[in-house]
Amino acid sequence: MANNLSVFDIAGRAMSAQMMRLNTTASNLANAGAVAGSKEEAFRSIKPVFKSVTDAPGIATVKVDSVVATKIDPTKRHDPSNPKADKDGNVWEAAVDQAQELVEMMETSRQYQNNVQVMQTAKTLTLDTLRLGK
Amino acid sequence: MSDPLFGVHGKALELRSQRLSLLASNIANAATPGYKARDIDFTKALKQAAGANGVSAGQAADANVQYRVPLEASLDGNTVELSTEQNQFAENAVKYRTTLSFLEGRINTVMQALKGE
């Protein structure tokens, strides 16, 4: 067997990737509702891009290739009383779709759990194999 | 040629462990755009590994890796369906345990014979 990735590597790295995804979701949600004085300064939600890392045929784990900002525009709101408002009295609200982020969070946690389960099963089976003949 | 002591179970255990990695890979890549889920044709691979031509379990596994046909195609080209993968993973884990039991039984038998009990 020439593969260098064990089940533990595969599930472990996938867990790190999902953790990264959870972090980006948390930072998006934390910034939801934040306002800025210009369109450029406003927060845009960020997303990790996953990429599979292949070893032998069919044996692959996953890594975060890059983290990109989404292309949704921040919403312009007329609010002259806001201290951050520009000369026309407008502020820009962070481009975060909160419903979408919550869905993303649920999905991330499920997929993280799946990988934990894989690891637990692999651990039990490995230990059982080690106990053979005892 | 199959092992005189453990029969086909040694090879089967190796193949099961290979398949465990493969299914773990599918589950790990559940959110990777464009990832194609794969699985081993286990029966074929075991037949090859247990044959007389000296094929190792690893080679037999590599030769019998196939793409899985998804029940419902997703928009980003990813063909991992978590329900399917989890089913297969659980089934494979149970069968791994079964193979372990066979091996354990054989080891116990041999040990008893050696001790003359």
Image: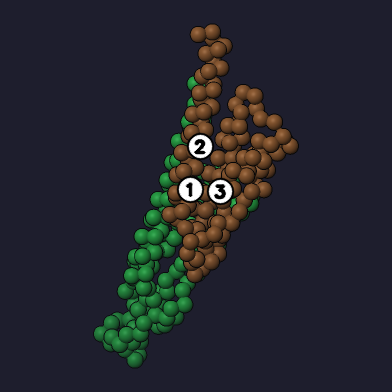
> Which chain is disc 2 placed on?
B
Q: Quadrant of the N terminus of chain A?
A: top right
* Element marked by disc 1: helix
Q: Is residue B65 above or below residue B116?
A: below
Q: Is residue B54 left or right of residue A5?
A: right
Q: Chain of mark 1?
A: B
Give the chain letter at badge 3.
B
Give the quarter of the image for residue A101.
bottom left
The residue beneath circle 1 is: B88
Of B19 and A2, the residue lying toward us:
B19
Q: Earlier in the sequence, mark 2 or mark 1?
A: 1
Residue linked to disc 3? B22
- The alpha-carbon separation of the residues under discs 3 and 1 comes to 11 Å
> Which dot marks residue B96?
2
Looking at the image, residue A12 lies above or below residue B106? below
Please state which amino acid type lies under the numbered disc 2.
Tyr
> For this rendering, which residue is in front, A48 or B56?
B56
Spot the green chain and give its letter: A
